[in-house]
Amino acid sequence: MQQSPLLDHHRAQGARVTGTHADAQVLTFGAVPEEYAAGTQSCSLIDASTSGAIVVRGPDAPAFLHRLLANEVLPLQIREGNPNLLLTPKGKIQARFDLFREPDGYRLETPVGVTESLLTSLDMYLFGEDVELQDVGAECAALFLGGPRAKEIAEATVGPLTSNMDIRDWQGLPLRISSAEVAGDRGLRLDAGEQGCLALWQALQTAGATPLGRVAEDSLRVEALRPRWGLDISDEIYPSEARLDNEFNLEKGCYIGQEVVAKINTYGGLNKQLFCLALDMDDPLPLGARLTRDVDGETRDLGLITTWAYSFHLDQAVALGYIKKRHQEPGTQFQVGDTGATATLLKGKPLRQIAGAWNAP
């Protein structure tokens, strides 16, 4: 994974950075409450320049992707897209990404850490089809805009937005604009490549966008009850367990893992599901901490924590975690490992209203 081309700029501006080299990330650009407020009331700006993309071209590309992917492919018109999944034969999540149809093929825009494995998996399913797969991550340096003013700020910077995917000239550079999930809500991805990344970042900031670090991003995302790849989602999770029901289509017909997700929909069978939990202590919790409670005099392991965050909406610490069935009643309390904390299960819906900043695919 490459290092963000903006990292030195962020450090020079006083950002708090954790990690080194490729795994470095900005925790905060200054004041977390202000960053959070921008994500709920104005416009947040996220450095997503280490995310990637794959292009799929060739005469057989539409049919090839349609038989593999969990969401629609063939009905998409040029410049249309959707959130999509590649599942395992057992119906679990192998990769998550946004799919867009372009004039000459399809583009799969991937979160950090997904591109290489997704490219390998797609190549494995090629059996003589006239399809070309290309990792174009080196050409990418995406920035995310979220919050209710995201579209307004984007248009003030790069001009009118008319579709879910667009390519235009900006300051003599090609600029790609597309819809994306940003901190748990729908927002925008703007990509002027590494050459234009800093200028675009500064222009968006000048127009009114507030840089958002990982701490505030997780607060927004957890309140929205949205999982993150690598933390809350892995190849051990079914889409419905992670509440990704809008990212697969039960009416589409055959695709990898379709039979399993259809059976889950028809007969039930989810052993666990992602929930938000309120915590009675504000100290960060270790990810993977087990959730236990007393059942008939026996301490039972009934879930685990995948993301910790502070909710400014509730004014207390919260977490995302997977909870086993029959223990998902709101108000159910769990002990969190050996931390001494108690976690109380909240309703299986976002903690605050999620407005949607852009017309989602």
Image (cartoon, rainbow, N blue to C red):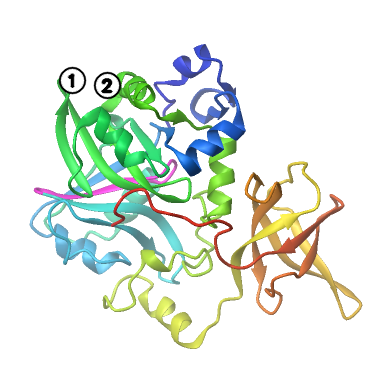
Q: Report, in whole angstroms, how far the alpha carbon at label 2 lies from the one at label 1.
A: 8 Å
Q: Nearer the viewer, residue 207 or 72?
A: 207
Q: Residue at x 23, y 61 (%)?
A: 65
- Is residue 107 a member of the stretch shown in magenta? yes
Identified by mark 1, the residue type is: Gln
Residue under circle 2? 196
Circle 2 residues within 10 Å: few <14, some 14–19, many ≥20: some
Q: Residue at x 54, y 38 (%)?
A: 37
Whether label 2 touches label 1, CB < 8 Å: yes
Residue 192 falls left or right of residue 95: left
Coordinates of residue 294 in the picture (x, y in percent) = 86, 72
Identified by mark 2, the residue type is: Gly
Q: Residue at x 27, y 54 (%)?
A: 99
Helix, strand or loop for disc 1: loop
User: Is residue 66 shown above or below 231?
Assistant: below
Q: Which residues are magenta?
A: 103-114
Coordinates of residue 10 in the picture (x, y in percent) = 48, 19
Give the quadrant of the N terminus: top left
Residue 106 falls left or right of residue 143: left
Give the quadrant of the C terminus: bottom left
Quarter location, residue 9: top left
Residue under circle 1? 171
Residue 196 falls left or right of residue 169: right
